[in-house]
Image (tube, rainbow, N blue to C red):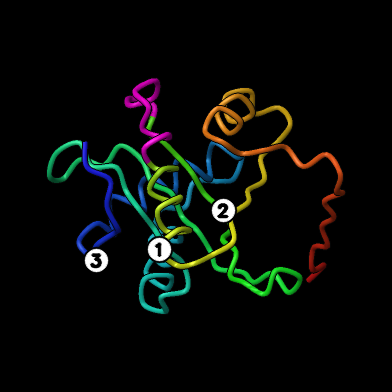
Amino acid sequence: MQFRAIDKKDLELVANLLDGYRVYYKKDSDYEGAKAFLSQRIQQQDSKIYVAETKPGTLAGFVQLYPLFSSTRMKKLWLLNDLFVAPAFRGQRVSVGLINKAKELVQTSGACGMFLETEKTNKIGNSLYPSVGFELNEGSNFYEWNNPS
């Protein structure tokens, strides 16, 4: 299996994965919306997307990261925002390979680290992330504000 940066030719395949990811998180399926969203990310170069390719034309999963900055550390920081493995490829350590690719990005970009959020009910994620070196930050509260419009 090859873990690599997304290529423009991957757009439709990754859009399928993003749509599956959204459905997993109880959103309505919207392949065209997923494709447009990814196309914007690629065109604007405002995220990093890596894929797990089993063979040409077959993607097992993807990870998408967004750059942030830590004022207290005065360095770049990455948000691992999306990680998804297609059901047919689960249990094959695809997510570990994608996370390792994300770790390479942190190191090569000189960032101070990366963080992520997952639901408390995500049993797989909550066992995966500590197993690959993430530490649960129990000293902080995570707050969210949603635009009402």
Q: Secondary structure at mark 3?
A: helix
Judge whether 134 appears above or below 39 on screen.
above
In the rendering, at what x and y percent does residue 70 appear?
A: 69, 69
Mark 2 vs mark 3: which is more N-terminal? 3
List the residue tagged with mark 2.
81
State if disc 3 and disc 2 touch (CB < 8 Å): no
Disc assigned to residue 117: none
Rounded to the nearest whole Å, what is the CA distance between mark 1 and mark 3? 22 Å
Rendering quarter of residue 58: top left
Question: Main SS of the magenta segment?
Answer: helix
The one nearer the camera, 11 or 7, is 7
Q: Secondary structure at mark 1?
A: helix
In the orientation shown, which residue stands out farthest toward the top?
A: 91
Which amino acid type corresponds to the residue marked 1 in the rendered image? Thr
- Based on the picture, tell me whether residue 96 belongs to the magenta stretch: yes
> Residue sitting at 43 percent across and 70 percent down?
41
Disc assigned to residue 108: 1
Judge whether 15 appears above or below 123 on screen.
below
Which amino acid type corresponds to the residue marked 2 in the rendered image? Asn
Question: Badge 1, how many Cα within 10 Å: few under 14, some, many 20+?
Answer: few
Query: What residue span does the magenta drawing correspond to?
Result: 87-97
Judge whether 44 appears above or below 107 on screen.
below
List the residue tagged with mark 3.
8
In the rendering, at what x and y percent does residue 7 appear?
A: 24, 62
Rounded to the nearest whole Å, what is the CA distance between mark 1 and mark 2? 19 Å
Which amino acid type corresponds to the residue marked 3 in the rendered image? Lys
